[in-house]
Amino acid sequence: MSVVVVGLNHRTVPLDLLERMTVPASRLPKALADLSSREHVTEAVVLSTCNRIEVYAFAEKFHGAYQDIRDFFAESSHVAPEEFSDYLTGLYDADAARHLFSVASGLDSAVLGEHEILGQVRSAWETAATEDSVGPVLNPLFRHALEVGKRVRTDTAISRNITSVSQAAVAMATERLGGLEGRQVLVVGAGEMGEGLARALHGGGVAGILVANRTWERAVDVAERLGGTPVRLDDLPRHLATVDVLLTSTGASAVILEHGDLATVVGRRDGRNLLVVDIAVPRDVDPTAGEIDGVTLLDMDDLRAFAEAGIRERQREITAVQAIVDAELDRYVDESTARSVAPLVSSLRNRGEEVRAGELERLAARLGDLDPRQKEAVEALAAGIVGKLLHEPTVRMKDAAGSARGERLAEALRDLFDL
């Protein structure tokens, strides 16, 4: 049995395909139930972010799980397998754990070292736990991944300066406009990413921040805490006619601003250019809106290119982070190996204790003339013999755990001792 990760990643998958494959938070419970019911999947976690859609699973067989997860992707997204199969990445056991540790560390993000991914990993795990789709294998793996992510950000400078996708989006807008001082900015979406956008703008010299969200109470809450003004989604056209920048990141499953919506707005802007930064996946703004005169549209592809330039400044930190990931991977493998053989070793020692106790009981009548000290010596002798006999099989079992030889030894012990 193996820990498996199968998924699509921003490094190799076109944005228009990645956004079709994402699993919104509202569909996660159903997705986890679906995965857990598949033949080769025992435990499952779905990690769906703006950079990736990945399924982590505890699987009976790697190839069987890979097929199950590929089928899940096709059925949940209504995208034919031939459209995405060539982009799928599949890893198992130590390589799967290393990948998760790298993801939690921010090494696999568009913005190197970003903090947001750590919360997303935690949220994915907590959702899986709520839906009872994780157990004794994935629980310790994800707990360890969160520890790795925290240690990396404490012990290295990987998260110095720009530490989130939200901050990078604001920095990109700042660079594109030559500064945001005196600008009016509209933020659409008040979830974790949207609040991050508003927070990155707060205190940056902008003339005003408008916050719109599907849930009015959430828009009010974020706006009040960050010195902005809440506005209704229905009033977007009116505000788009006056603001300088639109930053959007909602959890909508389809575009919320069509080409025609922005084309109409441009006519009321008196020739002033509108910068739109859309970091939602799936995208909030119709990609063809970028063809409208007077509209500059940037999305996650542009953000990745922008962030790539900043990576060079923190490149030297990557080596330090990878060293931590390698050390933590070794620790995880040792701990998981011990967990995997512990039940069998315990059963073996229990069987030895049963035999020892049974033989002493069978010979109790013949040992009746012994005084307490002599009985204690006999019992200690019997325990010592059993311990010596079981010591070498136990050590070899632990040393070989996780390998093909370990599986053979485990099967032999089960057969020989009827465990």
Image (spheres, rainbow, N blue to C red):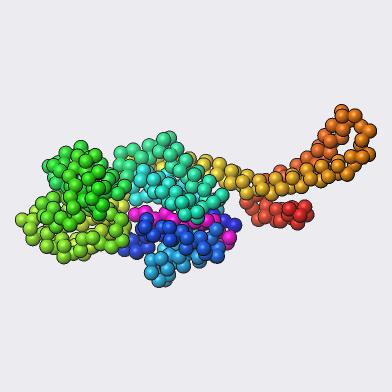
In screen coordinates, is 225 left or right of 293?
A: right
Please tell me which residue lies in front, 125 or 13.
125
Residue 98 visible from this viewpoint: no
Q: Main secondary structure of the magenta part?
A: strand
Residue at image coords 84%, 36%: 379
- Point out residue 271 in the picture as x, y percentages from the top left corner: 7, 56
Q: Residue furthest left?
A: 270
- Point out residue 225 in the picture as x, y percentages from the top left corner: 24, 39
In screen coordinates, is 335 left or right of 159?
A: right
Q: Is residue 51 magenta?
A: yes
| Magenta stretch bounds | 43-61
Q: Quadrant of the N terminus?
A: bottom right
Please tell me which residue lies in front, 122 or 85.
122
Residue at image coords 38%, 66%: 77
Determine the image quadrant of residue 395.
top right
- Point out residue 263 in the picture as x, y percentages from the top left corner: 13, 63
Residue at image coords 46%, 51%: 130
Q: Is residue 70 above or below residue 117?
A: below
Residue at image coords 39%, 45%: 119
